[in-house]
Image: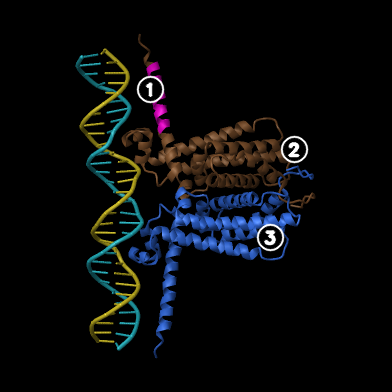
Chain colours: A blue, B brown, C yellow, D cyan
Amino acid sequence: MKVGADQRSQRKQREYEARREEILLAAERKFSQNGFFKTSMAEIAEDAQFAMGTVYRFFKSKEDIYISLVEAKVEELLRLLEEATQSRLPAQEKLRAVIQVKLAFADQNRAFFRIYVSEWSGFEWTVKSAFGERVWKRYLAQIDLVANLIKEGIKTGEFRKVNPKDTSLAFHGMLNSTIYLWILQSGPKESLADKGKWLGSLLLDGLGTSTLKRSM
Amino acid sequence: MKVGADQRSQRKQREYEARREEILLAAERKFSQNGFFKTSMAEIAEDAQFAMGTVYRFFKSKEDIYISLVEAKVEELLRLLEEATQSRLPAQEKLRAVIQVKLAFADQNRAFFRIYVSEWSGFEWTVKSAFGERVWKRYLAQIDLVANLIKEGIKTGEFRKVNPKDTSLAFHGMLNSTIYLWILQSGPKESLADKGKWLGSLLLDGLGTSTLKRSM
DNA sequence: CCGATAGATGAATGAGTATTCCATATTGTA
DNA sequence: TACAATATGGAATACTCATTCATCTATCGG
């Protein structure tokens, strides 16, 4: 019995995607280990169990692989963050949700996040190339998302009157540096999520003990 | 009239140092512009107005130049921070001083700081190589310095009982991300120091408006 | 089962560049 | 001034890869 040509081409499509995915996974492993410049196409091809020429059927260059990899992840994170902040909870709770989502994402993407954090504060070429533009845009989208949360909280009186963008930026810096050190230092057992509660309270209440709020 | 041989060798010593410095300055310019991997020895030599062979009389490799450069800067910053925190002011004021010193340093080393920030959250090789070890140590020394400040403040009751190391880390993250975006985005006119006051109040008082401190 | 098409292969290519090496120039000594 | 000793110059060397392409292999329709 014959199957239709369209079904067969569907299978082909699936196989194509699966192979592409294989290569991305191999690249993720290698880039995570050695960084972009010190990873060769030969290594990626070998890890993915393809010949180099084959890799070039799926991606037009080494940079293209990297772009695709980083973009997919940053997009996923942004999607998760948007999801987590669509509820009708107070801004404060949403802020805590953002922390939890980012930490959980880092937890599940430990190997990758090393690249992400690197690129986030990366080398010059990162910012100049098309890659940088695209990823940078998504990072700024994250900043904006949180900045809007902060605006919301200011309106409801939950937060002080601060500059939302600057504060969002500082907030991300706090998170990222915590994540970064955790990636570098801890074994895979320790949980990052535990730090989330504490970070939330630091951000909301500050370090000081004075119950009188200082003048700005 | 003759001068003693020791005086002459002193001059030589000085000249040697001066040339070494020239090369470092050229390297700093180039690395700042293009990053480590995209800067060639030929470019550094040309910028320093030496031949490549000469550059190799002062540094044994490209990486060696980079190491020397980054180390010198990180050491300088650490020295400045130690100086700024040796007074007998309250911990809170010292913390503000740390912010000011770091921001001022970034301001004066704008070109360089791009490298520093990059390396601070850099690629894997950074951490593994001898370079990474040495610079990393100094970064941790900064973290420790602030952690000790926080301990101090907890003892005097100025600060809440938090984990000093984690808090110091979050604090550095806040600062670094603010510095980083400033480096990328602003023209050379805007002052970074202005953000210092605000960052201090965010850290000490938090974002929230509630005058009752939440339970940890 | 066969020719045709698309997919896979990896050695060869070529560009880029860190490092070396020795001829030349400069400096120090007598 | 002449003779080391030392410093400098930059062309030549010796790589390391990203990318290509001629060739081989698997899949497909008929």
Disc 2: which residue: B156
Q: Can you say whether B114 is above or below B10 in the image? A: below
Quarter of the image holding residue B9? top left
Using the rendered image, report if marks 3 and 2 lie on a common chain: no
Question: Within 10 Å of the Cα at label 1, are there few (<14), some (14-19), or many (20+) other Cα atoms?
Answer: few
Circle 3 sits on which residue?
A: A94
Circle count: 3
Q: Is residue A59 above or below residue B114?
A: below
Q: Position of residue B89 (x, y in %)?
A: 70, 32
The percent coordinates of residue A39 (x first, y second) are 40, 55
The chain holding disc 1 is: B
Region of the chain picked out in magenta, as a range? B7-22
- Tell which of B131 and B22 is nearer to you: B22
Identify the image quadrant of the N terminus of chain B: top left
Q: Is residue A125 visible?
A: yes
Res B12 label: 1
Q: Residue furthest top?
A: B1
User: How far apart in space, not on screen, are marks 1 and 3 (Cα)?
Assistant: 64 Å
What residue type is disc 2 on?
Answer: Thr
Q: Is residue B147 magenta?
A: no
C-alpha separation, residue under disc 3 versus residue under disc 2:
34 Å
Q: Secondary structure at mark 1?
A: helix
- In the image, residue A134 lies at what x, y percent? 50, 58
